[in-house]
Image (spheres, rainbow, N blue to C red):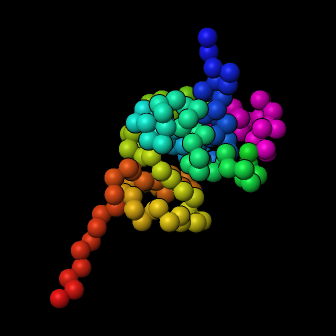
Amino acid sequence: MGTFVSPDLLAVWTILQEASNQPLDAMTMVGEVIRTRTTKKWFSDGTIASTVLFPEQFSGWMTHDPNRIRTAKLDAHDPVVVNAQVAWERSGALAITKGDVVLYHDVSKTPWWAAHYRFVMAVGAFRCYGAGPAAIVASNKE
């Protein structure tokens, strides 16, 4: 028997919350992050549901994020919903991130954690990071 809410629906909904105003590559990147986190069990028990709903990981699922309700009201045939579905399908190839990205943030704000992770690439309006620590530059304080 399948899950009550399909993993595909949760993933597409998360992509909509996170990147509905972004180009297809950025939407696909969000899908790739969901897949990578799920596979690596990075803030996840290895299911899509736990990956996208893990506390404070995807901003669209946070209580006060306006995108949570806005995206729940979208029509299934809305072009942005169709694009999110295409992005989720494309994300299976991991063609953009190569499975190396587990974090991202909008370029308009830099979260505290960004300095602690390895910057990998920028996609759309997102800066993307890998699970490894940021490079530490030693300074000579003699």
Q: Is residue 74 inside the magenta stretch?
A: yes
Position of residue 36 in the picture relative to residue 66 (left or right)? left
Q: Is residue 79 inside the magenta stretch?
A: yes
Q: Residue at x 50, y 53 (%)?
A: 104
Residue 5 can be seen, yes or no: yes
Position of residue 13 in the picture relative to residue 50 (left or right)? right
Residue 94 can be seen, yes or no: no
Picture quadrant of residue 87: top right
Q: Residue at x 69, y 32 (%)?
A: 82
Farthest residue to the bottom: give it: 142
Q: Residue at x 47, y 62 (%)?
A: 113
Instruction: Look at the picture and state if 140 lies above or below 11.
Output: below
Magenta stretch: give its range: 69-84
**Quarter in which the C terminus is drawn:** bottom left
Farthest residue to the left: give it: 142
Q: Residue at x 82, y 38 (%)?
A: 73
Residue 8 location (% of width, % of height): 61, 27
**Quarter in which the N terminus is drawn:** top right
